[in-house]
Amino acid sequence: MPELVNPIQWATPVFILMIVAEMLYGWRTGRVRYEARDTLTSLLMGVGSQVAGLMQKGVVLGLGYWVWTNWRVLDIGWQWWAFVIAFIAEDLAYYCVHRAGHRIRWFWAAHVIHHSSQHYNLSTALRQTWTGFIALNFAFRLPLFVIGFHPLMIAFVGALNLIYQFWIHTEAIVRLPAWFEAVFNTPSHHRVHHAVNPRYLDSNYAGTLIVWDRLFGTFVREDPAEPCRYGIVKQLGTFNPLKVAFHEWIGILRDVAKARSWREAWGHVWKPPGWRPGGGMTSDELKRRWQARKEVAGGDHAPEQASSVAAE
Amino acid sequence: MMLWTFFLPSLLAVAFLGWLALRLYGPNRENILSEEAARVAFQQDFFDDGVDAVLLDAPRRHALLLLDDQEAAGLVLVFGDKLVTRRLGKDLLNTIEIDGKRWHLGLDDLVLPSVTLIFDENTTGSAVADELRGRLEEIAAPG
């Protein structure tokens, strides 16, 4: 077994330098915007996520080893091509966990943190969950160990996948060559993923390869005529990292406590975010209403297109 | 001790980047809401609602919106350099306390539990303010 380094440890200084470079670029050109408290919150969420990651690492790897030792179907070695296949397989697992993270409130409670900034810059990439372990996100990787990929190999390629996703959190890059946009996740595709415009909601779940979205029908192209508005449907009114980290979990607990039946309680946990007994405002409902309104208005775009930037 | 050594560089980097963002982009203390900006921001998020009137508070950091839906009101507030909107219905607005020019709204919202608006005298005496006050008190009333 080769000795694998932790790529994130090596990438972190590069992340910091890139954030500094983007801040300076935005300051000079006005094409990227940072806000001090928002940035600080994102970075603290990033540090907290690393702490949480360290605390859970042993359990997750241990479980991975146990599954790999007792249940694996194939003996996949450490050849170079095994890393390539593992990367692609892990990217597919990421697509699945990410899609669940938007479509099921239980997983959304962990993932919402990453979307909770109204800014879209490199610091947003570091605004990561503290509670992925509680959500049991790692369960989506278990099939990879059953196939026969070594847990350390999956941890390694998973880290590479995360590193790839850092640089796409920027407005500084508009478009990349068509062949690249066709195969890989790019800043343009991922801006759409972070947007709350109804037409962009619940799309582009890819980690590295955008082909998964094209395959599974969740790909939406960025439309220059409709600039992305970032964040979540119900924007946060706080920079408090603890509230950012736990607000949706607390929301679930409150809703379950108030539920009038087991069925309702189940719905509050496992239905899409925004679901309420008798309806609510899920992203599907929001899109349906927006579509209906668009058809009445007879246009391709929402009636009002204005930036939500306050300084106007 | 080991954990502290491990995370000290991260915390120093966070402090440095926070400082740099503040130096380059400023503290964002603009008083920046106009009636039109508040209306557009609200209708981007709640596109089914018609807005009849907008009431800006004196520092122009909050706006209340009179909606065509009689059972709700709109709220827009400045948050950092962005705006946050809420649709104040029975499920969200818990209390309203009015103390002269100061309106304090208590919300059932973990990430925005309360909002205080301070109006000038001309605004609080207006017909729109009267109507909004009545509507908010009705929404917040128990039952």
Image (spheres, coloured by chain):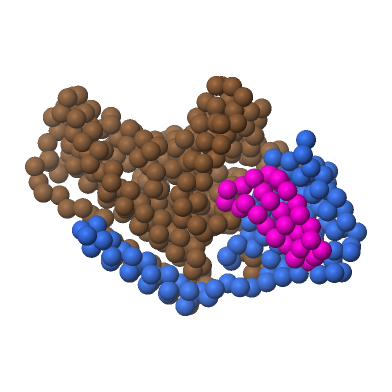
Chain colours: A brown, B blue
| Image quadrant where one finds the C terminus of chain A | bottom right
Can residue A229 be spotted in the picture? no
| Residue nearest the viewer, comparing A155 with A227 | A155
In the displayed structure, does residue A50 sit left or right of residue B102? left
In the displayed structure, does residue B65 sit left or right of residue A143? right
* Percent x, y of residue A276: 62, 32
Q: How many marks?
A: 0
Quarter residue A82 falls in: top left
The single residue placed furthest to the left in the displayed view is A1
* Percent x, y of residue B43: 72, 52
| Residue nearest the viewer, comparing A132 with B41 | A132
Range of residues picked out in magenta:
B92-119
| Image quadrant where one finds the N terminus of chain A | top left
Q: Main secondary structure of the magenta part?
A: strand
Q: Residue at x 69, y 40 (%)?
A: B91
* Percent x, y of residue A49: 36, 51
Q: Residue at x 65, y 30 (%)?
A: A279
Q: In the rendered structure, does residue A255 fall within the stretch colored magenta?
A: no
B61 relative to B42, above or below: below
Q: Residue at x 73, y 62 (%)?
A: B117
A138 relative to B133, above or below: above
Q: In the rendered structure, does residue B104 fall within the stretch colored magenta?
A: yes
| Residue nearest the viewer, comparing B66 with A218 | B66
Can residue A130 be spotted in the picture? yes
